[in-house]
Amino acid sequence: MTTALDQLKQYTTVVADTGDFQQLEQFKPRDATTNPSLILKAVQKDDYKPLLEKTVKEHAGKPVGQIIDHLLIAFGTEILRIIPGRVSTEVDARLSFDTKNSIAKGHELIKLYEDAGIKRERVLIKLASTWEGIRAAEVLQKEGINCNMTLLFAPAQAVAAADAGAKLISPFVGRIYDWYKKSAGAEWDDKKMGGANDPGVQSVRKIYAYYKKFGYKTEVMGASFRTVSQITELAGCDLLTISPDLLKKLAESNDTVERKLSPEAVANDSIDKIAVDEPSFRFAVNDDAMATEKLAEGIRTFAADAIKLEKVIAALQ
């Protein structure tokens, strides 16, 4: 019988959300995404210590930040040996409010990939969906450097990213779900708020419908999933980036997966055009408690993991 994963691939480009590239072969995703937390998790495994130690040794004497960049590219390059598509590599979260240096870091990462023989078309530079991160993406996209806007929770972020010409956005389904479930407390009803009614699923559906109605070329990639149901409810989304644990569950399931999203399926959704400039963007995100809290939390977490990764590297020098 056809697995749920194979069925999903008929409707959606499947992306692996991991730095553990040894797990990629069995699931055969087209693309892969990484972030500081995933790379930190990977280098703590014995299987990846040789790559970590080799990278540190080859770049001994360089600042720790530069060694991290080389490590990110080392992981990205290994990933690209396995998958046919693109890898997403993240700009340091501590630059989330610094347009100038986010652009500079994007240039540095692309140069390192190109020096390693990787064409820029196979790389997505991940930037936080802050106003400053979106402005950095606007510049990089005009230079032919494709960007993946991460930590995206609010419609204003999605609209601003598309207006800036970002190649791809990553709305965080699971983290949106987490916030609403925690906020509801004892009143949360899993049955009522699951499936198509899941607030994270609803968020992606609305963004997808908006993009299709107004002709945006920016790709929508649902991310940060907690359950198989969240994934299958978004079958038909442009891309879905999925953890190895959930990829395994899909690969072991023979449940039927039906297409839920398509331009035709959302054609009759009632949608108004949103005009976004800096003041309206900042107010809209600030006015959305979930988006404000999860964006700040995400930046803090990625920044903290980048610091932990620096300490791992410093201990080897």
Image (cartoon, rainbow, N blue to C red):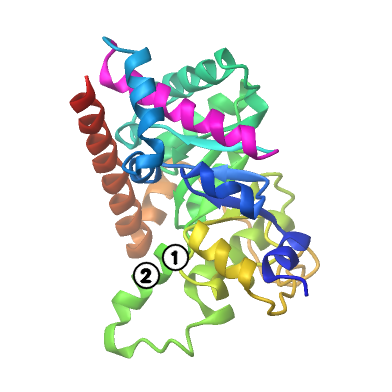
Residue located 63% across and 32% down the image: 81
Comparing 263 with 302, the one in front is 302
Q: Are marks 1 and 2 in contact (CB under 8 Å)?
A: yes
CA neighbours of label 1 inside 10 A, class few (<14), some (14 to 19), many (20+): some
Is residue 312 visible in the rendered image? The answer is yes
Q: Nearer the viewer, residue 66 or 234?
A: 66
Residue 109 at what x, y percent from top left? 48, 22
Q: Amino acid at mark 1?
A: Gly
Q: Position of residue 103 (x, y in %)?
A: 45, 23
Q: Which residues are magenta?
A: 62-84
Could you give the CA–CA distance between mark 1 and mark 2, rounded to whole angstroms?
6 Å
Which residue of the protein is positioned furthest toward the top in this rendering?
Answer: 61
Q: Quadrant of residue 205?
A: bottom right
Answer left or right for 5 relative to 278: right
Q: Which mark is residue 174?
A: 1
Q: Is residue 228 above or below residue 300?
A: below
Type of amino acid under label 2: Asp
Element on which disc 1 rests: helix
Residue at x 77%, y 71% (from the top left corner): 2
